[in-house]
Image (cartoon, grey):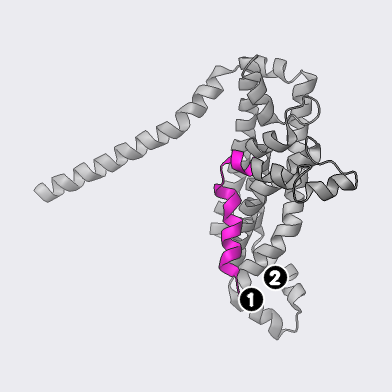
Amino acid sequence: MKSININRIVIAGGILAGIITVFFFILPVISLLLRCSPGIILSTVQDPFIIHAIILSLGTAFITTVVIVLFGTPLAYIQARKEYPGKDIVETILDIPIILPPAVAGIALLLLFGKKGILGFFLSEIGIQVLFTVTAIILAQLFVAGPLYVRQAKNAIVMVPVVYDQAGRTLGASSFQIIIKIILPLARKGILSGIMLTYARAVGEFGATMMIAGNIPGKTQTMPVAIYSLLQTDMDGAISIAVILVWITVIILVMVRVLSDRRQVC
């Protein structure tokens, strides 16, 4: 009987801990959503600078995601299917931007693309300015969101059994045909999930963007940066943009969940 009572106490304690954890994660979001009415949001998004910030965030995140998919997918395939010297080192390098504090990522990019930076010096010599431009925003997003996509795409490709590769070679397909016609279609749902998560991460990028793109309204001010600026002068405006970002994130997460559920059914 004592053993049964102890088990019940442990289970009840685990359930209580789970409930407290869930509420800890969801209550801040609920408080944010309840704080701002639709009227305030509509009033905020009529500001030309806010409209520009929204369009800039969504547009640069789209460009960033396209670039990441084009360059990151081949790398994800190599990491998933090939063995080569230094593979673990590459894996570690890909993990670094994910765990770096945003300010550190921003300083690193600043030292790379600044006028006295390793690349910035040569770019400035040929008349190309990177800092405080839309290009800087995209570079910041690429740095922080790119590894996320590569990891997700790699995991999706790993889930495709190697036997399909072997079957393709038996039928005379080239390596490129196997990748395009077999592996990527079978891994498409996981890759699509990675694309959407990467897009959401790019839209929400703040720290590195602030460091190398600055906060110029109507030019380099993205949605997260606009929130930071409005906190000092217009709390309702800052909350309105934050709510819009929350809804963008929720929509993307729901889409990812739907894709994941379909993948499990298949």
Give the Cα separation between the discs numbered 1 and 2.
7 Å
Type of the residue with mark 2: Ile
Residue 120, percent from left and from top? 79, 46
- Report the residue at 72% width, 84% height from top: 171
Q: Is residue 209 visible?
A: yes
Asked if disc 1 and disc 2 are in contact, CB closer than 8 Å, the reply is yes
Tag 2, which secondary structure?
Answer: helix
* Outermost right residue: 126
- The secondary structure that most of the magenta stretch takes on is helix
Left or right, residue 246 beside residue 139 = left
Left or right, residue 232 beside residue 2 = right
Left or right, residue 12 beside residue 93 = left
Quarter of the view holding residue 262? bottom right
Q: Which region is colored magenta?
A: 83-106
Question: Is residue 171 or residue 213 the one in the foreground?
Answer: 213
Residue 6, percent from left and from top? 16, 46
Residue 83, percent from left and from top? 60, 75
Q: Which mark is residue 133?
A: none
- Report the residue at 68% width, 64% height from top: 75
Question: Is residue 145 or residue 263 the one in the foreground?
Answer: 145
- Report the residue at 60% width, 74% height from top: 85
Q: Residues within 10 Å of mark 2 (few under 14, many from 20)?
A: some
Residue 85, placed above or below residue 257: below
Tag 1, which secondary structure?
Answer: helix
Q: Is residue 1 visible?
A: no
If the image is split into quadrants, where does the C terminus sit?
Answer: bottom right
Q: Residue tagged by mark 2? A: 182
Question: Who comes first in sequence, dot 1 or dot 2?
Answer: 1
Task: Please tell me whether residue 7 belongs to the stretch shown in magenta.
Answer: no
Q: Residue tagged by mark 1? A: 164
